[in-house]
Image (tube, rainbow, N blue to C red):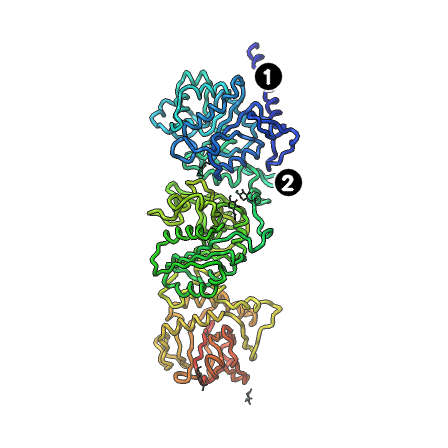
Amino acid sequence: MYRSKSILILLISLNIIFIKCIIAFDACEKSDRGETGCEEQHSRNFYGEEVNVIYADVLVFTVATNETHGYNRYIDSVRTFGIEPKILGFGQKWKGGDMLYPGGGWKINLLKNALKPFEGSEEKIVVFTDSYDVIFLGQLSEIIRRFKDTGARVLFGAEPFCWPNVELAPQYPEVTKGQRFLNSGAYIGYLKEINNILNRAEIKDTEDDQLFFTKAYLDKDFRESNKIQLDHLSEIIHNLHGASDILEIKTVEHKEGPETYYLKNRETGTEPLIVHGNGRSKVTLNYLSNYLPNGVWNSIDGCVSCKKGQLDLEKIKRDEWPTVLLALFVEMNTPFLEGFFKKIHQLEYPKNRIHLFVHNAMKYHTNQVNRFIEAHGAEYLSVKQIKPEDGTTEWAARDLSLDQCLAKNCEIYFAVDSIAHLDNQFTLKLLIEQNRTVIAPMLVRPGKAWSNFWGSLTKDGFYARSNDYMDIVHNDKRGLWNVPYINSAYVINSTLLKTYDRSQLSYNKPTVDADMAICQTLRDLDVFMYVSNRVDFGHLINADSYDITRTEPDMYQIFENEQDWEEAYIHPDYPEELNPQHKNEQPCPDVYRFPIVTRKFAQSLINMMESFGKWSSGKNEDERLEGGYEAVPTRDIHMNQVGWERHWLYFLQKYVRPLQEHVFTGYYHDPPRSLMNFVVRYRPDEQPSLRPHHDSSTYTINIALNEAGKDYSGGGCRFIRYNCSVTDSKVGWMLMHPGRLTHYHEGLLVTNGTRYIMISFVDP
Ligand SMILES: *[C@@H]1O[C@H](CO)[C@@H](O)[C@H](O)[C@H]1NC(C)=O
Ligand SMILES: *[C@@H]1O[C@H](CO)[C@@H](O)[C@H](O)[C@H]1NC(C)=O
Ligand SMILES: *[C@@H]1O[C@H](CO)[C@@H](O)[C@H](O)[C@H]1NC(C)=O
Ligand SMILES: *[C@@H]1O[C@H](CO)[C@@H](O)[C@H](O)[C@H]1NC(C)=O
Ligand SMILES: *[C@@H]1O[C@H](CO)[C@@H](O)[C@H](O)[C@H]1NC(C)=O
């Protein structure tokens, strides 16, 4: 009876402490977005600096020498909760050993010093965390409440590895649940006991702090007298290394307003409030920080955090926009390179602010690259080209382009590889306005999951898929994403290039691809890489099966790069032909004429045939046919002779069939069948005309590949029943007419030059 009463009293008094503490912290904490409603409650922190949060009983510390991206993220996260930490070591040279990340005894010595002014305030609570790889996910009041709940006087985070000295593992108390070993990246404790630990032994700046704390913890008497515990279950602190896959981001939907996010430990059911991306887990931390702390992203507002710190170039005169080094890389034979250059040229950015750098490693593309530079080079501030015959490697060329950026005093470095098609002409402007050190526009192979970023990494630094990868690639989630790897097109703020020389920041690492090398370096330097799909920027070309031994290899890319194939080869007026309001041209009864392919297509097809060169004899005997006999022979080459039949049949199905269904309504045959697909050549000295005949087809198509009156004289097609001729053939336009029975026709005499037409007998 007596006992339980005392517990009750204790509970009541604890309660009072909680309430007091909650009042102390909640009174003035900022909202999720960092706005504060308590300006009038500004107060001085324990260093006499003015802060807008009262936390007199809690001292929050971190260590950072430099303002890295991780540091800024830490600061953003704590400020979200109205916490103003004291930063130790800022602006000083790192003294804790030869690693960028805090990990040394220096941290302990800094904290020891920082706590000196508080002698006598032994019941103050100290919250210490690293900064570069830590984010806060909750209110300080809640952190303190949970800390007090543990009954510990000092609480360290726990992790699954005994580090740095594995041999100490057996000395650790066993645990049945959660993580067993101490991690010193985050801890909380009363000033008195924290001081006891810090002063337990001397430590040199370069000695290992985790070992120092481990020894204190493993000293059983010391541990018990100071009530030191580890946060085995991640009630407050979660160390990610080796324990990231037990974490998940939970979503809470709300009746009104956007959903909210929090972190949950699936194994222990806890919801940690301080996350430490120790060791190799920085990539995971970066992933988490795309959603956490709650408020940085949601499905309604998209990325809230990416709207911070943007530039507005519209406010600046175009002549004063940042100078750019635009570095183009043709490192492989690439389909649709003309389209690539066209989009580069169309970028909505003043060319008198752009220095051009081109590395072409491919002999095959020499003419295309030269044509672009000859046509447009002079519009840019300067042009530098490295040619295939210079023998420069990709690694060296990319490094040279960085140097060139510095030599030209550029503000922005913009690398674009030949497979990156920037369909959005505002790409460069938007990326610069986003104001991130390294940022890529998301580019995806149309209809595929192949993109220019990785959501995650394997242990060896190769591709791994993050949980949200498909959502991002499909634009189900739009935003600005911190990712471990980008390629193909990206902007780098030249401030970064000025900070590191080529021995520190380079594409040139033996054994790995240039892009992997630079991304690994950036990760090691704590430089965040972002990929943006806030809007559509463009797409990636698939160069995997590009066969430059073909004549006109782009023509063969209808399957691999359909979108680009269409852009290059389908007549821009084609879609209008399917518009019900549009009147299709009908030069003779039931003979329709449509624009269907571009001049480029027509010329390419002629080139394919002429380079193959084996025109048929024009005799009745034809070994290419099953029966070996052709009643109305022409001088021609069949599509299958140039390996292009599959492609042609797909073209028939995708582009020709809809036109047929549009004008000859009620006839459906999908896919259309066609055994005879060929290009015919008429010329005076060979075969100048074709006698009247019926086609053995349901309908026939006839595409003019060159120009009447220019490339040849005479020619055309006469439909005898109607005494109607089409002689003004237009390049890329297609005649379509019924085959057998009605449209008995002849090929009119070509009197000079050469006429080429493409014929298919559809559904014979
Ligand atoms: C970090 O800051 C120090 C002092 O401000 C500076 O000397 C050093 O170059 C910085 N290092 C990096 C990696 O930015
Ligand atoms: C651009 O980013 C830098 C670095 O984060 C920041 O200092 C600057 O304020 C930003 N610019 C604007 C206009 O927000
Ligand atoms: C580049 O970064 C620096 C430092 O963060 C920033 O001040 C500057 O505005 C950035 N420049 C551009 C063009 O984004
Ligand atoms: C066919 O048309 C041409 C010119 O359009 C005309 O000169 C000729 O007389 C016509 N022939 C017949 C048989 O109607
Ligand atoms: C035939 O075509 C060639 C080349 O297009 C041209 O030079 C020549 O004058 C033409 N001859 C006649 C008779 O039209």
Q: Position of residue 743 (x, y in %)?
A: 51, 80
**Left or right relative to 407: residue 726:** right
Q: Which residue is mark 2?
A: 256
Q: Is residue 318 above or below residue 152?
A: below
To which quarter of the image does residue 632 belong? bottom left
- Mark number, residue 13: 1
Q: CA distance from mark 1 to mark 2?
A: 38 Å
* Mark found first going from the N terminus, 1 or 2: 1
Is the CB of mark 2 within 8 Å of ligand 2? no
Residue 637 shows in the view: yes
Residue drawn at (56%, 80%) of the image:
588
Residue 477 shows in the view: no
Number of other residues with Cα within 10 Å of mark 2, as a class: few under 14, some 14 to 19, many 20 or more = few
Amino acid found under the numbered disc labelled 1: Ser
Determine the secondary structure under disc 2: loop
- Mark number, residue 508: none
Number of other residues with Cα within 10 Å of mark 1, as a class: few under 14, some 14 to 19, many 20 or more = few
Amino acid found under the numbered disc labelled 2: Glu
Farthest right residue in view:
40
